[in-house]
Image: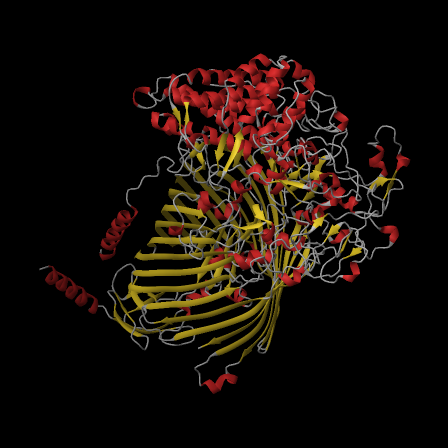
Amino acid sequence: MKAIKSLIFLSSLFIILEGCKKLDVGKNPNEPDFVDVYSSGTSVKSIASSLFNTWYNGTHSYGNSPAMFLATASDNVTCSWGNQAMRDMSWEPRNAWNNAPNYTYRATTKNFFDYMYKSINTASNVMKAINAGLEIGNGGVDNNQVKAFCKFNQGVAYGMLALFFDRGFIVDENITIPDAAVATASTPAEVAAAAVGYLDEAILLSNNTFTIPASWLGTTGDYSSVEFKKLCNSWAARILANMPRNKTQLAAVDWNKVKTYADAGLTSDFTIQQDGYVNWYAEAGDYLTFPGWGKVDMYVVNLMDNTQPQHWDDNSSFPTPPESTNPQDERIFTDFEYSSLNWFQAARGYYHFSNYRYARYDAAYALGDGPVPDFMKAENDMLRAEARAYLGDLAGAAAIINAGTRVTRGNMTPVAATLTEIEKAIHHERHVELYITGMGVQFFEMRKKNLLQKGTPLHWPLPGQTLETFGEKAPFYTFGGVANADGINTSNAGWR
Amino acid sequence: MRKLLTLMVAFCATVSVFAQGVVKGKVTDDKGAPVPGASVIIQGTQTGTSTSNDGTFELNIPSASTVLEISAVTFGTQTLNVRAGQTVSISLVNESKLLDDVIVTGVAGATNRKKMTVSVTKVGEERLKIVPATSAASALSGKVAGVRVNSTGGSPGGNIDVLLRGDNNLNVGSSPMILVDGVILNGALTDINVDDIESMEVVKGAAAASLYGSRAGNGVISITTKRGNRTEIGTTAVTIRNEVGFQNLQRYIDLSESHAFNLASDWQSVSNYTKYAGVTYPSNYLGGFAPGLSGSRSIKADHYMDNPFALNIDQQKEFFNTGTNYTNFVGISTRSKLTNMYASFENNSQEGIIQYTSGYKRQNFRLNIDHQVAPWLKFSASNLFISTKTQYPGDGGGIFFNIVLAEPDNNLKLDNPDGQPYLIRHNPFSNERNPLYSVWKNKRDDFTRRWIGNYSTNIKLAKWINVDLTHTIEIENYRYTSYAPYDTWIVANGGTAPTYGMSYSEGSLYKYSEENNSQNTQATINMMHKFNNLRVTGKLSYLFENKHYEYFDVSASQFSYPDIPDFSNFLPTNPHSYSSGIQDIRARNYFAILGLDYKDKLLFDGMGRYDGSSLFGSEERWKPYYRVSGAYRISQDVHINGIDELKVRAAYGTAGIRPGYDWQYRYYSFSTPGNATAEQQGNPFLKPSNTAELEFGLNVEFLGKFYFEGTYAKSKTTDALLEVPLIPFLNDGYNRQWRNAASLESNTLELTLGANWFKKKDLSWNTNIVFSKTNQRITSLGVPPYLSGPDGLFYIKAGERYGAIYGYDWVRTLDQMAQQLPTGKTISDYEVNSDGYVVPVGSQGTINEKPIKLLDANGNLNFGEIGNGNPDFIMGISNTLNWKGFQVYMLIDIKQGGDVYNRKSQWLTRDNRNGIEDMANVPTNLKKTLDYFQGFYDVNTNNRYWVEDASFIKLREVAIGYTFSKSSLSMFKGVVKGITARVIGRNLLTISDYSGYDPEVGSIRNPFDGTDTYPNFRNLAFSLQLDF
């Protein structure tokens, strides 16, 4: 009896100890769910505020972006290290892109692809929520701000996809493609058109008055809707002007459109204020410039001083070129640093060697907390000049160039108002003034002028892992390699 | 009033009993010593008495004859028929003797191993204490068939991979569930000390482990620690063990001592660095990066790496240290009539082999108590408090790569520009950092405080039924700090010439803190009754699991003031970052088990379990498990000459593995603070995986000396958990989801042979051999085949062997080459070179000698199986020889087959540091250019050249000891009861063709030798044990 009493007592204690806790522990307390994100105006605004940071990480980080190999493939930066495919995309002669799902640097295209869609799909869901009547801010006061930002992000994400891949898939708040297949994907031109369409919507929405906070864009200060509209315009021009895969396509660009957009574009640099490796870090640019890593390709050194070799020939007797003393472009003294010691391995080819490194953003990169421009006014100027040049306004083009960094910073002789000279001058500024700004700026420039070395891919296949997920069979299609040089997918020309 | 009533009832009872007669008796142990405090109860009543100090008792019985039940703490229970007036003597058997052969894990009740129907192997203290493992995690190596133990790296206190039989999971870990004194462990097994362990029971496979349901798909290891119940009543036993030893590397990686660069014409005039042609050196140059250094090294025309360095420093030997390890252990056990206690303290230190790094230190405090509150009520408590401190080398694993990349003439001991030692740019022609600076300057200190406790009450309701109420606790606080001082040199943009292109990082501080709190409550009704020839054992149990976890971390950089590692020392505008997380996990589990034992020869076992867990998707909250098993002890019925015991058994059962905490949820993750990104699609239908296993066993004891056990197990895992990639634009931006999307099969053959060759007073010799062989295959996959593991080396594909290494291959025969001739070429344009690879004819020894990749039938690169990570078999052979006081023990661990992908060797080739490239002493006609090896390097593409057979024969444990006899200790007048001195070796010798530090590298699932692995090392120690 005593035992039974004790048992009852202990059992009661046991039940009390255990409590009446339910098995269901409720929602995930650590990360927001879809419902959390899209149920209130406040949280929709929060998720919208992250869109550009997602895009930025997909285009500027070390591991998730093609930025580093685009820089070496375009002979703007040289680096013999294999990291992030820098070496694989700068072999001489050029090799094909390895699109196997197990390629060491597969994340450079796979994560880039995924990050763009993370931004696109989230922007689309935000748009859906607003279109369904959700109000952002009191009485929907911030609806236009958020909508414009979503449209901008859809535009820049589709823009990067169009510039980089050979095909894409267009989805948004109104378009779904449940039966999407690799074979029926949209062409880059269609994706680019969609991108510009979204930017058009952003431009239209920016006629309203609002402010894009600095934290949304990673900039030093807030952007007014007026400044934001300029950024959208510049982006539309950047996409349209950089789409051509070759000279033939270059001739078909709608330069009137480019001119219109660029003329309404940036009047000051769009600059990312880095925050010490936390949210905003122009990581790829850091690796492309810091000691022991990327150096300036001799192609660029030669642009600034034509007494410098244009190419470090692949033999052991090639002499280390001396420091420039009388260059045509004085930015070699301010933005670049003589660096005769080569840290690259000779066994990987002397053609990777260089006698200069880039030093312009050293202070910003030293501790990762300074400003690094991402879309310079100078780039927009070149888009304005380029459009004018191809539309026949050579004087107008020359005037823009001569009022810009070529003269103000480089102390170079003003460019003559001829198409050839203007093309050369634009080419020069993109390689020198726009060094490591924006992902792929120099690559797109080389591509449309047929200057990429023979065998360089002109665009990239959908990532191998994505093709695998689609159920495609390996080996997966790819581009690049001298044997495949067709001028459509793979460069069949080149500056050398 | 109530007291009065009780007195009256007691009086009446006494009178009535008194009227019937008295039984007198004496209770002794098996050696004849009196057992005081033993309980003597009339069966089926609460009436009884207890023995006095001399073990005697006197009890009134209610009738002329009755049955007495005699029991005492640490002794088994005995029953005895008695008559009034009789004087009896009862000899109780010490429980500890009974326990040696008894299995308690996964069964209906404590079961003699001869009567087991499933595979559970018990490793007792005798086998564990000869060479006490540095932790419980490594104690099972080579001792149990079907158990694979793999040290994933040598980092002191680091993780040990344990796999029981096959690997039943794809994206989920395959570690078994660990129980320590009934506490389901969440934290590391490497913190549990071995000196306290009384036994380890290894419950292999899903059938045997079914009782543990959704946590036991990978099997169970149950550890029981010592208690005071083995000590004689009224005595105290003290054990002191001290061990001190040395740890060092057994072998080093073969690196090139030559290079292919053009030497300056006057290179021999310089002795402190190699003077290369094409490089201009500043005056007074000492080595490393220095201002004024310019130019580039160039490769000599023949591309042979056969030029000498000016000096040949063995960088690995300079870098790796001989570390020390020590253990101080004190264990005290004591026992009184009603209470026994075991307390211990262990102080353990393992320095490891890295300079300036103190390694792993652990203090374990244990207190185990049992108290018989009343004859029907027993209280037990087990407590273990653990405190660890681990210091990791600065900059993580990069140092292990940097040290092998350092060239033989690099002086790692030059000063930095400000006088700090170890110039970080020790090689001006490379961007690798000086690893000595990293270990000298930066530190990471980890601390854990952990409390593991089990508090149980056993209530005897009747002879056939008792109840266990148990509450277990495991609370672990873990925190660590990484600190880089203000003046930490880094190579970054912004460095100036006077500072060698380097700058100060201005410092950073990172702190991480987490707490795990698991509290489980269990109620179990234990039943046992014998109906004539049928013994029935059963359990009904309910277990509630409740786990809470939370963490936070914070980091900031750029100190305002040097040498103050405090977060207040950062301005709010400085870079800073933070994160936190919280998890609550609950589970309710109900189970019932029934064991039938007919005449000690026919045995049956059946169980069912129903698990509900918050980790299962909201639509799949509950999952059932079951087992049926049986055995027939043939030798009980049939006598066969020479056969002492013969048993066949079979079992079929299911178990599973639970999903991870957030796998069921759809969520946006915080990729950076405040910024959320679409991450994972949710799955409310996510279930635990389900492993069903069928096993057959044969147990034979023969010729009075030998023991054999053979088991064949076949398991089938369905609903295996898999992280499935999604197309983001079809899934709201989410690019992955957890699903039950795969199935796997494995089969294992386990053989154990034990032999007691001699068992005499002064000479004994026994041998134990364990052998196992496992095959595992992926049978279905709900996603396209994908590459998994490090660098995507392992191909996950339906129908494929699990553990297959995939990559590209090289043409090795002219027949192969004939199938893939390029246009315009004939087979006569090729030849097989001295290494057995096809190369262009006449190219041997030239830069045109390059391996050719094998193509498939379609002319594409042949992507196929290039290796198999699964061993053909594993085997452990142990021998123990005792002669008088001497003891020699040796455990040899054998792994036959099983490839390792040696990525480190491949990476070394990138920098032409690999020893295979050294052509200095190679005959001219066999020399290869560096280009040839770069062909195989192939920018780290996965290819067959780097797959190595990692078979090994390892002298895993060895001990030579002497135990002083009692007579030789007479000078201590009985105070010191025993002294044992031993020389102990752990991993002393490895015989293997593998070219890395150790063929035991990477995880069991992904045998891969990465660049950042802390090498395994050997340990030689001296141990002295004193028993009081």
Which quadrant of the rendered structure holds the N terminus of chain B? bottom left
Q: Is residue B17 left or right of residue A363?
A: left
- Which residue lies most toward the right here? B828
Q: Residue at x 44, y 15 (%)?
A: A204
Q: Which quadrant would residue B50 be assigned to in this image?
A: bottom left
Q: Position of residue A131 (x, y in %)?
A: 39, 16
Q: Residue at x 63, y 33 (%)?
A: A71
Q: Is residue B31 left or right of residue A306?
A: left
Which quadrant of the rendered structure holds the C terminus of chain B? bottom left
Q: Position of residue B612 (x, y in %)?
A: 39, 39
Residue B900 visible? The answer is no
Q: Residue at x 58, y 46 (%)?
A: B166
Residue B979 lies, with reference to residue B584, above or below; the image says: below
Q: Residue at x 45, y 18 (%)?
A: A202
Looking at the image, how many numbered discs can be counted on the residues?
A: 0
- Which residue lies most toward the bottom here? B971
Q: Position of residue A153 (x, y in %)?
A: 48, 24
Colour mapping: secondary structure
Taking depth in this image into account, of A60 and B851 the one nearest to the observer is A60
Taking depth in this image into account, of B979 and B914 the one nearest to the observer is B914
Taking depth in this image into account, of A179 and A460 the one nearest to the observer is A460
- Which residue lies most toward the left here? B1
Taking depth in this image into account, of B445 and A158 the one nearest to the observer is A158
Q: Position of residue B488 (x, y in %)?
A: 52, 54
Residue B901 lies, with reference to residue A30, above or below; the image says: below
Residue B446 lies, with reference to residue B196, above or below; the image says: above
Q: Which quadrant would residue A476 be assigned to in this image?
A: top right
Residue B393 visible? The answer is yes
